[in-house]
Each structure stands twice: as C-alpha cells, then as structure tokens.
Amino acid sequence: MSDEQPVFSIEKIYVKDLSIEVPNAPQIFLERETPGIEVQIQSAAQAVGEGLFEVALTITVNAKEGEKAFFLVEVVKAGIFQIRNVPESDMAPILAVACPNILFPYARETISDAVNRAGFPPVILAPVNFESLYQQRLMEQQQSESRIQLQ
C-alpha cells in the first residue's frame, strides 16, 4: 500500500486557440440594436505524460441580432496539470470539474479583452457550475447506455 500524498498542481495555463470575427464591420458599428449573446462551453482532457494532463476549455460567444452577426469569438484556454497519487475514480471529476473551474476565469478575461479590442463593449460571462454540467453529462451517458441495453 502506497502512502504517497496526492499531488495536484498547475504547471502552465495558456491560450491554445483564439479567433474573433466581425463579419459585418464597419456597418455593424452603426447599428443601435443590442445583440443577443449565445455562449457555448466545452471541455476536454487528455494525458500528455506521466501524471500530466492537458485540460482545454473551449468557449464560443456569438453575438447577433436576428440573422445579423455582430461578432463571433472563440477561445481555447488550456492548462497542463500535474495529478498524481489520486484514485482512478476521482480523476474524471478532477479533469471535468476542478480543472475547468481553474481555467474559466482566465478564459473569461481573454474573451472580454478580445471583444473589447474588436470595438465592442466587453462581454463578462456569468460563472459556470462545472459540477452540474459534469453531473448532467453523466446522467445523459447513463440514459443512452440504458437505452442501448433495452434495444
């Protein structure tokens, strides 16, 4: 039995991808309407070495009024995390909840800054409950697995 202490540390946080589009400039800056904001969030994790994992948080923000696009910004904020001596059963929640929770404020700042630099008021994203997203995904997986077994 190993009595080594669990290790969790942030090795690096970085922007893996960043894109912003303002397809209807300059006319869009003459508009008086306030666009609707649509936000999509995804996370993915992969092992990159012994005890090292990359977690990537992808956030896409689409601002449009009807069919008229104001801007589209997408950021993939990633981190390399050292995770050792943790039970296998705890790995999924760490990679799907704890790591995205750490990355989210950095991604939110990157999006706000990119939107502002594109000439629009900054978009400040509301906090995200990654634990409830994780639980929701688990329930969806269990439901689809039980559907497969019933067929």
Image: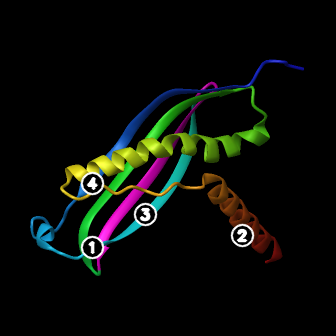
Question: Between marks 2 and 1, how big is the CA–CA gap?
Answer: 39 Å
Residue 76 in the image, given as x and y percentages of width and height: 41, 46
* Up/down of 30 relative to 112, above or below: below
Between circles 2 and 1, the one closer to the viewer is: 1
- Front one among 138 and 47: 138
Residue segment shown in magenta: 49-65
Amino acid type shown at disc 1: Thr
| Lower sequence index among marks 2 and 3 | 3
| Lower sequence index among marks 3 and 1 | 1
Q: Residue at x 46, y 39 (%)?
A: 78
Amino acid type shown at disc 2: Ser
Query: What number is the disc on residue 149?
Result: none
Q: Residue at x 72, y 69 (%)?
A: 144
Asked if residue 59 lies in the magenta stretch, the reply is yes
> What element does badge 4 sit on?
helix
Does the image show residue 51?
yes
What residue is disc 2 on? 144
Mark 1 neighbour density, 10 Å: few (under 14) some (14–19) many (20 or more)? few
Between circles 1 and 4, the one closer to the viewer is: 1
Does the image show residue 45?
no
* Up/down of 120 relative to 12, above or below: below
What residue is disc 3 on? 39
The quadrant of the rendering that contains the N terminus is top right
> What element does badge 1 sit on?
loop
Query: What number is the disc on residue 34?
Result: 1
Amino acid type shown at disc 4: Val
